[in-house]
Image (tube, grey):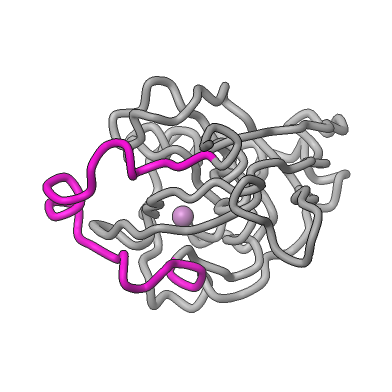
Amino acid sequence: MPVRPIARLGEPLLRSRSHEVDPDHIASRRIQTLIDDMIETLHDARGAGLAAPQVFEPVRICVMEVEANERYPALDRIPLTVLINPRLQPIFSGSTPSRTESVIMYEGCLSVPGLRGRVQRARKVNISALDRTGNSVELHWEGPVASVVQHEVDHLDGVLFVDRVETRTLCFLDEYAKYVPMDQRILDGARMT
Ligand code: NI
């Protein structure tokens, strides 16, 4: 189960729409090995999530896990989650999420090493997907973890956080650590008064 190289910004696969996985192929050695390698690569890079196109495989699979992640200390825990062919339904009332319906969080990406920037996303999301055994899963995530899954599923559509970032908040990791106060790194609209 090798750690795989991670595609970086500029790699065309990161900008293409990934293919649906045929449910009959989920049990195949190729897909199961890919999932194992993605989990190992995610752990090795100490990321919160990884999508298959980030390891040069243009298929609709992402993995997420947060266990007291040192890169995202304010994130809630995410148990190891493998999503195949995920469909997301962000939940908000108007045409875009209001402030109280949003998480505004400094995001990073293993494919955009060294950068952070603030992205606003819906703070509630319904998720429909298949798991690695091919069973259907329905999840409802709220708060910063909803941002994580939206970031990962964006990858499957060729979208990167730099497309959604408030550009004037972009910063390198050292400057982020130095200048962005802890209480500004993750703003959950539901917890703001
Ligand atoms: Ni990413």
- Magenta stretch holds residue 179: yes
In the image, taking residue 23 as reference, residue 183 lies left or right, namely left
Where are the magenta residues, as a range? 162-188
Q: Is residue 34 visible?
A: no
Image position, residue 66 (x, y; %): 46, 27
Image position, residue 109 (x, y; %): 39, 54
Nearest to the observer: residue 132 or residue 91: 91
Nearest to the observer: residue 170 or residue 112: 170
Residue appearing at x 67%, y 44% in the figure: 31
Nearest to the observer: residue 44 or residue 22: 44
Image position, residue 85 (x, y; %): 77, 50
Q: Is residue 2 above or below residue 173?
A: above
Residue appearing at x 61%, y 44% in the figure: 149
The quarter of the picture where residue 141 lies is top right
In the image, taking residue 159 as reference, residue 24 lies left or right, namely right
Q: Is residue 80 above or below residue 153?
A: above
- Magenta stretch holds residue 175: yes
Q: Is residue 182 visible?
A: yes
In the image, taking residue 39 as reference, residue 140 lies left or right, namely right
Q: Is residue 127 above or below residue 173?
A: above
In the image, taking residue 174 as reference, residue 189 lies left or right, namely right
Residue appearing at x 29%, y 66% in the figure: 170
The quarter of the picture where residue 159 lies is bottom right
Image position, residue 16 (x, y; %): 61, 75
The quarter of the rendered structure image containing the N terminus is: top left
Residue appearing at x 59%, y 52% in the figure: 99
